Image (cartoon, coloured by chain):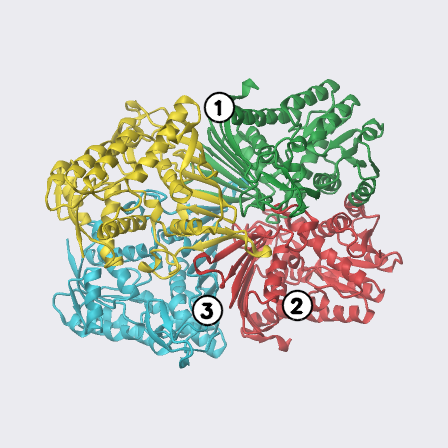
Chain colours: A red, B yellow, C cyan, D green
Amino acid sequence: MEKVRIGMVGYKFMGKAHSNAYRALPMFFPGSGAKPEMTAICGRDPKAVQESAERFGWSGAVTDWRELVGRDDIDLIDINAPSDAHKEIALAAAAAGKHIFCEKPLALTLEDSRDMLAAAEQAGVKHMIGFNYRFSPAVKLAKKLVDSGRLGQIYHFRAFFLQDWILDPEFPLVWRLQKEIAGSGSLGDLGAHLIDLAHYLVGDMEEVIGTSQTFIKERPLADNMTGLTAKGSSGGPKGQVTVDDATSFLARFENGALGLFEATRFAAGHRSTNSFEINGSKGSVRFDFERMNELEVYFTEDEEDVQGFRRVLATDAAHEYAEAWWPAGHTIGFEHTFTHEMLELMQAIQEDRQPSPNFRDGVKCQAVLEAVERSIDERRWVKLKEM
Amino acid sequence: MEKVRIGMVGYKFMGKAHSNAYRALPMFFPGSGAKPEMTAICGRDPKAVQESAERFGWSGAVTDWRELVGRDDIDLIDINAPSDAHKEIALAAAAAGKHIFCEKPLALTLEDSRDMLAAAEQAGVKHMIGFNYRFSPAVKLAKKLVDSGRLGQIYHFRAFFLQDWILDPEFPLVWRLQKEIAGSGSLGDLGAHLIDLAHYLVGDMEEVIGTSQTFIKERPLADNMTGLTAKGSSGGPKGQVTVDDATSFLARFENGALGLFEATRFAAGHRSTNSFEINGSKGSVRFDFERMNELEVYFTEDEEDVQGFRRVLATDAAHEYAEAWWPAGHTIGFEHTFTHEMLELMQAIQEDRQPSPNFRDGVKCQAVLEAVERSIDERRWVKLKEM
Amino acid sequence: MEKVRIGMVGYKFMGKAHSNAYRALPMFFPGSGAKPEMTAICGRDPKAVQESAERFGWSGAVTDWRELVGRDDIDLIDINAPSDAHKEIALAAAAAGKHIFCEKPLALTLEDSRDMLAAAEQAGVKHMIGFNYRFSPAVKLAKKLVDSGRLGQIYHFRAFFLQDWILDPEFPLVWRLQKEIAGSGSLGDLGAHLIDLAHYLVGDMEEVIGTSQTFIKERPLADNMTGLTAKGSSGGPKGQVTVDDATSFLARFENGALGLFEATRFAAGHRSTNSFEINGSKGSVRFDFERMNELEVYFTEDEEDVQGFRRVLATDAAHEYAEAWWPAGHTIGFEHTFTHEMLELMQAIQEDRQPSPNFRDGVKCQAVLEAVERSIDERRWVKLKEM
Amino acid sequence: MEKVRIGMVGYKFMGKAHSNAYRALPMFFPGSGAKPEMTAICGRDPKAVQESAERFGWSGAVTDWRELVGRDDIDLIDINAPSDAHKEIALAAAAAGKHIFCEKPLALTLEDSRDMLAAAEQAGVKHMIGFNYRFSPAVKLAKKLVDSGRLGQIYHFRAFFLQDWILDPEFPLVWRLQKEIAGSGSLGDLGAHLIDLAHYLVGDMEEVIGTSQTFIKERPLADNMTGLTAKGSSGGPKGQVTVDDATSFLARFENGALGLFEATRFAAGHRSTNSFEINGSKGSVRFDFERMNELEVYFTEDEEDVQGFRRVLATDAAHEYAEAWWPAGHTIGFEHTFTHEMLELMQAIQEDRQPSPNFRDGVKCQAVLEAVERSIDERRWVKLKEM
């Protein structure tokens, strides 16, 4: 079995999730796909990255990603550093002939993401993007129901990613609230996942129009930040929030379906509601990531007196990935989406094919993000073919 | 179309519910069953009963139920006075050849309830008992699924009637907490409904064993009482609570199913959770009266990847009673169970047959209530055939 | 107590709902507001209207609404005929000095609705519009929480009215699918309710942009129609659907909140999901009319370890209207919203004030409807002050 | 930091869960408690156990548990072999001075479990039993609410463990259906978890009475079995099912609370519903393991108009274990309960104290199991002090 020696850039929230996934593969999916080897991890703080290497199970630790890219004993670069660093690392990795896994969003701009795709294609390497929610078993079931025609023609897709972690005006100005690093706020961070799910489940969009809002325009400067939590310095100096707190948009799909999207960090009570609903001519499905093991499914063809949304627990042997884990009814969590994601990556490498989703999906998502932003700036419908 | 001239004893909570039902029939179920005429209402307080007559739409008001029973222009006596008065009125009504509708519980003892049944049968009158929950469209759907075999052989029935209205120790000693008037506490008031649903949906029981508790043993004397609310005199004299606050029991059904029942007025947060679940060899159903328009339904024969409890909204034309009310998705409430109940009464009279449920069902329920009480007193399983 | 003698135009779905409400008032809300007298009902089919009069409890029946408007013994005209007839009747009623209750939408156009408001104001009569969903106890609770500041500053309002009754392409071309009678499709029929709830709960909108779709463009001609059900003539001639099957739109409120709306008749599995969510700086509320007795409520100020959406059953004495009905935990249904609506009408007449909502609310709603339509036609944001 | 060298007996369902937990500790809970070393795993099939060792990350593999117990380089024996083997291994481990982790049920009989406790205490080793459900963050929250008095005096505990994996009569006779290996059926396998939760959350029981049923009395002999799935040989020879398919029982707690329990493998639609509800004088909590990240919480002291069960997502920093995993709103699954369980084991060893739950809890649970069985056999209430 092929081995894939991985060098990972980033060791915070996503670094932890990816490490856990690589470690889980040989145990839960033995013999399925190439075998990941956790060769080296990279971060700027030498002490912290060394600790993370030990804690997460990486053989080595470095402080310069260029070193990682330059090493012979590395086959794949996993990029989960802040978004503004994605492009440079990916281009270097491609030039060095390394396979690339890149967290979403692919880049800060559509142009950059296209450059990344071109570089990866030219180099002939495998490339994948981290739209991990595709890999929930319940989402896989939704995909199966759509693709097999059991929902009929799709009329509606509505999707929401609702969080509330910056509702407090004293929450500090972390990097996710700064356009130059994050590229975008709720739209790029949360909306990107919804857009990818729309592409995955419904198809391409024809045009979009959106609106956005920054409810809290200034925040305390952050002393430090980790993952999604941070401590601010109340009473101290403030800085400008340069990204959107909330964005919603309408879309028309090429297949005639209507789309409705909202991403916000100002929905009190929603820690991380990542939900969608699809309505088709023969049925509907509903998903909410806070209950990620469940898919609600409705069929118009059910007998008249017992029609209703079914709460399907996607933990049976009939559901993708389920048998690798625990008996029916025993649920999995957030981290498992990454394990399934990395499984696809390892299988694609083993089978010498591009993983899915890959940079093409990243570019497509970026095009919608930028079309939405343009539609907001120019207050008009923007067609995707403009982009 | 036959007219049924009604004399009703009682004008509080149940009196209001029955009056509303009689008034609704000609409007929502025109031409279906005999036509109720609201001839006279009876209560001991002349002023209050007169006001109720006007408010509820009764042609007359009297203060002595004997007068009502004695009148020639009355065909049916509707008894919803406190439980300790049921028997005497029912016997007199039967003797006078009147049809009888009696609220549950039929009587304070099994013996009394048997006397009532015997009297009604001897008199050849129609008799009905007020197990109104049978008449929820969602419960009717459950019944249909059981009877048609779509749930297969029944293995389990578990049922709960959970309330919290006397959780506060300062809630006063209303009549429902006094054995000599109410006969029983949570068991007779709430459990009786569960027992009837068990009989209706699963069948007869073979044996039972229970336990009960009175958590608050003394309460302020009540100044007055209406329906389920009352004002106590905090700091004033207290009296003994002589009924059970909570009772639970196990049952074995004649068909081999296991039963589990709990009735309590001490379940914080449950205003009136009247719920049951049935598990059969081919499927299951779940019902909760707080969401009375819904029945959750599961079938083992559904395709493997989309098995799950369906949330069926019993408001479609395919569901009993639904077309008489509003379009699909437009719900009904508590009071409608009484309208459907009185519809059955009027149809039975029109068709010259006994309504269902009738005093036989009341006696059967009383037998279980008394068997449970005996099982508690004697700390042993009690067979229904003992009773 | 003042009596209000009512003449009602229309006797189908809404005529039944209104009649039931007028009948319920004296029983459940005695002495509260003027007393409705069901004087006469009007419809074009003499036999059918006569039957409805008897069934619903109206003293008389006529076939020409002009006769009704002209009668001295009528104080109030209740208009629930198809939408294209609203204006003419309302103008005549105002001219005759009658109070007016008009079902939504007020008229087919904004201009017409303004004429109706002007006429009613000039005549000095009471005028009300039938936005019945305001009168759900759970919605009243939402209103109380917003107005009292318990939700803080409002950031988001998202609302959906999802139905599926015309999903079948063979469902016939009933009047609700014809622009010349209905004025609008899902937007005017369903969206109008959402818009009114937005006005009621959040405030005025600044600008909107929408999109809409007619998924099934031709349908069998209807043989007849009642309420929301109808029988089509499959295989027979077809006609053009001239209204929208689905419409969604974005809104920006004057207070800075973002709005998101969708109305559709193509959401499989949704019989009548009329739902909204409000997110504020201090809390959130969620409502779904299919579970109309419930409001989900979240407060940011709850202790950290027990924060979560509360499922509040709005049937306690602490909730508006609840004490008039049944004990806590005993639910009400769709029809009760009309009873509460007519209660407001009768109270307003008694107190000599305009009811709420009235024609001003109807005009305001119509302005948004027309702004959305213009935004669809002209593919641009439309400001409400343009209208 | 102390190291704990582990030898594990068993490598199927539970072996996988335990291995995963040991591996997760250094990554997610670094520096917390002793450090587990996965020294050797034991199973009878040499090839299979060797494969499991590699797959799960154990340094060595042996085929005789005696060898494991005899090794100097092992500090702790983890017993997750079938239940009939627990006692012998535990006694040997204690005699060898090893710490012991034992899966539930501790033994096949109360007497055996007492012997095990005595042996462990005499040897002065640490001992723990695998009641993993205690370690759900939502259950920890329930415990905190009870212990801090926020629920007041406890009146009710009702608990259900509902599964449906042997509903099909053709499902084969796996070891869990054979009394001589499993000791008990649904009661010991599922009910044991409920009993432990009752002890943990409410306290000791005074007396119990139960009933049980074996619905399918003969089943095809199993060709093999893994975890909870198996393939039967339809049409082939059958064997006797010697354990209960379903058991329910009533309990009275020493503190006056009433208990109600049901464990069944015949509840169609329930893959693994492990749920309980506690009602106290000041509030209630509800838990369902199929939605294990959630606890529903109700407080009587909430303001009157917003009382309702709160859906608390136990993923905030305010909840136990949560910060070690993912940001708020990002859920965990079944396997994480084992990680937390092993964390307690490692912390107890580090702190030189007995872990909780330990063999004392296992004995206490076994006493209830045996009391329930006796109550079924003798058809009478059995007091725990009899046992």
| Residue sitting at the far right | A72
Along the line of sight, the residue nearer the viewer: D183 or D283: D183
Residue under pointer 1: D380
Disc assigned to residue B222: none
Distance between mark 1 and mark 2 Cα atoms = 70 Å
Residue B275 seen: yes
Indicate the position of residue B218 as horizontal and vertical percent values: 34, 24
Q: Chain of mark 2?
A: A
Residue under pointer 2: A366
- Up the image or down, C279 lies above or below D354; here it is below
Indicate the position of residue A66 as horizontal and vertical percent values: 84, 59
In the image, is A124 to the left or to the right of D131? right
Which of discs 1 and 3 lies nearer the camera? The answer is: 1
Location of the N terminus of chain A by quadrant is: bottom right
Q: Amino acid at mark 1?
A: Arg
Q: Residues within 10 Å of mark 3 (few under 14, many from 20)?
A: some
In the image, is D188 to the left or to the right of B378? right
Indicate the position of residue D386 as horizontal and vertical percent values: 55, 18
Along the line of sight, the residue nearer the viewer: B22 or C210: B22
Secondary structure under badge 1? loop
Indicate the quadrant where residue A305 lies: bottom left
Residue under pointer 3: C167
Q: Residues within 10 Å of mark 1 (few under 14, many from 20)?
A: some
Number of marks in the rendered image? 3
Q: Amino acid at mark 3?
A: Leu
Q: Chain of mark 1?
A: D
Q: Amino acid at mark 2?
A: Gln
